[in-house]
Image (cartoon, helix red, strand yellow):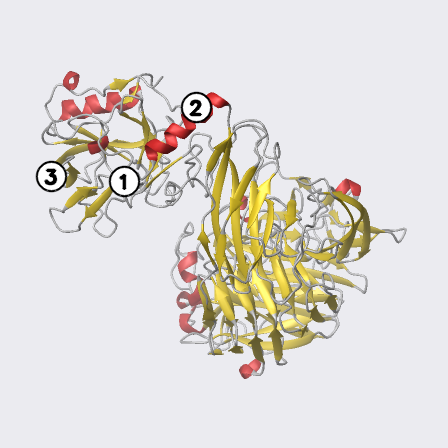
Amino acid sequence: MKRTLTQIILSASLGLAAQAQTSLPPPPDWSAWTVTAMDDCSTTREFEGPVTNELTGVVTPRSSRIVELGTGLNFQDSSGVWTESQDLIEPLTDGGAAAVHGRYSAYFSPAGLNDDAALTITTPVRVYQARVLGIYYFDTQSGQSVLLATPSDTAVAEILPPNQIVYRGAFNSPKLKADLRYTYTKAAFESDVVITSQPKVSPADCGLNPDTTLIQVRHQWLGAPAPGIREVTVAQGPGPVLVDEILDFGDLWFPRGRAFAWGDEAARGTNAAQISLPGAGGQAVQAPVAKEWQAAGSKATLIESASWNSIARMLAQLPTMAKVAKDPKETRLAAAGLRGAAPSGRAGARRVMRVAARPYRTPGVVLDYITVVQGTGSYRFYEYSPSGPLYNPSGGTNFYVKYSCYFNGTLTFDAGCVLKFANDSPVLLTYGGVTCNYTSGVPSVLTSIWDPVYGDPMDGGGPAQAADTALCLYGVTTSQTLQGLTVRYAMLALGFYDGGTCGSAAYSVNNCSLFNCEYGIRADYQTTVSINNSTCCEVSTPVINVGACSVQGALSAMSPPAITNLPLCQFVLPNTSVNFTSAASPPSLTYTWSLDHTPTLVYVVGTNTSVSIPPGTLGTGYGGQKVHFYATAPYGSGEAGAWVGIVDSSALAVATNWITYTNGKGCALWNTRSTNNPPSLAWNTGCLLYGKTGFTAISQRDDWNWAYPGQLPVTALTSRHGYMRGHGTAGTTNNVPFAGYNTNYNGQNVYFCTSNSTVVTATVTNAYTRCWGSDLLDYTILVFSADLPSTIHPMAIPLYYGTPTSYSVVFNTEQGGQMTANNPPFPSLSPAFGAPADADAFPPFNQAVTFKGGDSGSPIMLPTTDDVLVFLGGDSTSPASSQMQFDMDTLSTSVGIEPENYQMKTHSVQ
């Protein structure tokens, strides 16, 4: 059943004029908009026409404009028409392959890796030719190089659709094995050397000092002019100092690369060619790769270097090659000039590139470089509308960051501009500078595409961190001032990277507000950041600084506005009007009513604190429709919710009785759970489930989780057997298939609690685990040394095995002793048995997230009409089954008791 959900948004006035009784448009129907590709990085969608208010029927004329942004978004085809770019590599009739549907093109020669034109990149300005020369050790102390591997003449390229080329066995020397992978996207090109084995020789084997040795990949480039170079020190410490050269050719730009362990193409995807910024949504564990450009006549060498010590641990996880004794005759090349002559280019036999027959999933250590096609110089984000960034009924201009944007000029943010980021973690980056035309009280807003408060509604869904980095200054060596920015729902709000040699760049963050971000401000390598009069709210880590950075000042942590008067949850008959009243703190907020977590707003009521929903608006079927209240201030938001159930007259009586029955009951399972041994335990007698048969089968504590009591919860299913999760309990990693006896818990105790709060101790004698093997089961069954007393009543299972999918009022529990339910009026915060997640159920049964780390195995229960709790399985673990009973019987036999006496009890749930 499709639900009609209703929400209220309370948005701070921010000094802007309040709007009253206005209408917001539905989410964009792109087919009805006029679409124009403007240039290489922007496409404009425009709409003009009447918009009808879904509640009031009022028709309002409106003009809306959305500017989609992304580096390389469009290219001019052969007829000069702007066309949308594609991340696509296609085979050619000559046996090679090419990517031609973008602002720049790439050609891959069928003559092999040792062809001087193995890779050709063509931009609107010039043609570049490149090839890989080899992989080396280089000792910065002695100046000596050791050649490890050169490209193989026999390596054949395979096309990995849609946009990758891989050479398996590209380097296949006796000392090292590695593959080569190229990735083409509309914005950038990436070259990955994937080392697939531990090197046969270490730097020490070659007479080099590991603490001062680099592992290098060297590339030959032809046709390149002298680049602009910005030097940034990216690694300091006991190893060699790495100085990265950020290269700018005018039409191509080379940011810093990185090295990282990699093992699964599915996790990396085919859009890897993008700048990965540490501390945002990029690789969690990576080492910097510095570049150096050395020119000699018509040829140039691009040298990528990573410290040996920074990747040695990654390499140690790879398959080994046979070890050889140190060879005193190992070739060493002098450090002068290009640190060793480059292997001469030689075109091999022409080979036909074919589409790969299998995915590329080879584990390895990746050393990469990325070249980015230049952004369109400078760019200006002008105001959304004359009244400011909040929604304007007459329309405005929204900037939609659809893909990552890399600009080489100045980004200008006008007061009142609105930028909305797509949900797949784009980055807005400039290496040219920033200008903020700030007006007091009118922020420039960078937020998620779903956010209905600022700009036009553009997408559905709920609050989520959209941008990877909302604004990044990368390698900007002149001082910059960021002011008047409001950043909402980003993984990283503001990032400052590679600010220049010896801290020459000084950045200021003034009068900015950061809201609901994982990270606030990150200063990375030789940057100086000053924070002034700026705030954050619901930001997990306000400031991070890495390397030789200086961060002065701090973000002031602000509490979000609070809903001080909750609306009334209620059931109503079809075609009944519904009234809601609420209040928020501070009281100066303006109130906006809208459809719930959808971009279709109903109307704005200014400072009104109540609204009446007309008859029939919420539909005619029972759907548990919700009304939400949001309070939005310059520094944060608050949220509360209420629901409306549309029912017939008989269902209204049942629903009313249910509310009466649950009135005053709580969702906390216990009042006391100590960490001493034995623990002090006490049930919460006001819990909704307290006193039902099977309630005491839930254990509150055990011996194996002292730091996190109850994180492997046990539920008694017979008087001798307990149930808990299987994954992570058998000495294996999670989700590693396993089935067998498990002695890890033998001799340890599980603690139960009677209804009058008397502690009962059960000692584990043996266990049997199943962990997501071919039988797709996940549980551990424990057998105790003695029967549980009659005061601990095991939990029953359904009359028929299997996980029920249509039961109502199914209660989930979690390790902290809270419970929620997955149906109106008590829907769970986490989906269970097909019910949708909903954070806005009737309080207090909406207050615990019951699907999080450590909750696996926490019992899920159905209370029956005769007050019996029926066990339906655990969070993310298996329900009762005939196989589970067989494993219980096996355990019973192993400890010398009769299996027939310890069968799970069934109970009807009809």
Residue 218 image position (x, y, % from top left): 60, 65
Residue at (71, 53) in percent of width and height: 186
Please say if 66 is above or below 529. above
Point out the image quarter for the C terminus.
top left
Residue 363 image position (x, y, % from top left): 48, 48
Question: Which of the 4 quarters of the picture holds residue 792?
Answer: top left
Q: Would you say 905 lies left or right of 655 here?
A: left
Foreground label between 3 and 1: 3
Please say if 195 is above or below 248. above
Q: Would you say 384 lies left or right of 666 here?
A: right
Identify the amino acid type marked 3.
Answer: Thr
The reply to whether discs 3 and 2 touch (Cβ–Cβ < 8 Å) is: no
Residue at (22, 28) in percent of width and height: 694
Instruction: Give me the C-alpha separation between circle 3 and circle 1.
Output: 28 Å
Identify the amino acid type marked 2.
Answer: Ser
Query: In the rendered image, which residue does mark 2 sit on?
Result: 806
Question: Which of the 4 quarters of the picture holds residue 508?
Answer: bottom right
Residue at (14, 32) in percent of width and height: 784
Instruction: Give me the C-alpha separation between circle 2 and circle 1.
Output: 31 Å
Residue 386 visible, this orientation: yes
The reply to whether discs 2 and 1 touch (Cβ–Cβ < 8 Å) is: no
> Any mark on residue 758, and which?
3
Sequence-wise, which precedes: disc 3 or disc 2? 3
